[in-house]
Amino acid sequence: MLRNARFLTGEELDGLGFAEIGENVLIHESAVLVGVEKMRLGSNVRIDPFCVISAGEKMSIGSHVHIAAHVLLSGGGGIALHDFSGISHGAKLLSASDDFSAGVLTGPTVPDDLRKVRTELIVIGRHAVVGANSVVLPGAHVEEGAMVGALSLARGTLEAWKVHAGVPARIVGNRDREGVLRAEADLRQRR
């Protein structure tokens, strides 16, 4: 049990050795960060308790991004989270995955020449959201403003400003693009 759990201080964050880090970044002390030297974080980023973030190839997290508790970002092929995107509780973004149908061995304890791994960049667009307990597979591109509903499987390209849900995710609705952009403009005027 974590008692008196807290977010890391600015001094503690500076000491971790990020490739780049903006202002007003909150990372909970229980988060596991692997490969911080390859991570670029914008400003106004919040990473909640019990997240595991492994940079692998590269990890880019824009500004005004929230990563909720118990999220896994496995960045073997790289992950890019653009400004105002969000990753909800328990979501898993896997930019590398063993090919289980290829007649090869699987897992990180096996030599690379005996495995077949699909490794591709995942892109979560500006204002896009990945819902709770969803899984995003290698090469997925969640376009600007797209929403992945809870408990969904995202692969391929998910269309901008649409709500996608299911296994595999398919379009089930629309998002209010103008409303979201007006709210962003309002935020900018408050500064």
Image: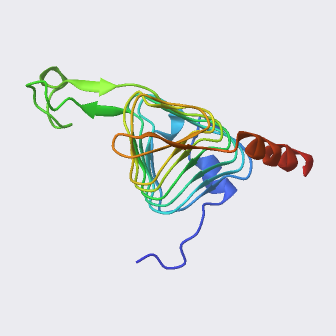
In this view of the protein, which residue sits in the foreground, 60 or 180?
180
Image mark count:
0
Could you tell whether 186 is left or right of 177 in the image?
A: right
Image vertical order of residue 190 relative to residue 144, above or below: below
Q: For the point 47% across and 57% down, which residue is it?
A: 31
Q: Is residue 135 left or right of residue 101?
A: right
Q: Nearer the viewer, residue 190 or 76?
A: 190
Locate residue 151, reporting x and y percent: 39, 53
* Colouring mode (rainbow / by chain / secondary structure / one colour): rainbow
Looking at the rendering, which quadrant does residue 133 occupy? Answer: bottom left
Residue 55 rendering spot, x and y as whole percentages: 45, 37
Q: Residue at 58%, 48% (x, y): give it.
A: 86
Query: Could you tell me if residue 48 is visible in this image?
Result: yes
Q: Residue furthest front?
A: 173
Q: Nearer the viewer, residue 103 or 182?
A: 182
Indicate the position of residue 22 as horizontal and vertical percent values: 71, 43
> Residue 158: percent from the left, percent from the top?
49, 32
- In this view, the residue farthest toward the left is 103
| Quadrant for the N terminus in the image | bottom left
The foreground one among 153 and 35 is: 153
Evaluate whether residue 59 shows in this view: no
Residue located at (54% from left, 31% from top)? 159
| Residue under the image location 43 percent in, 59 percent down | 70
Quadrant of residue 39 within the rendered picture: top right
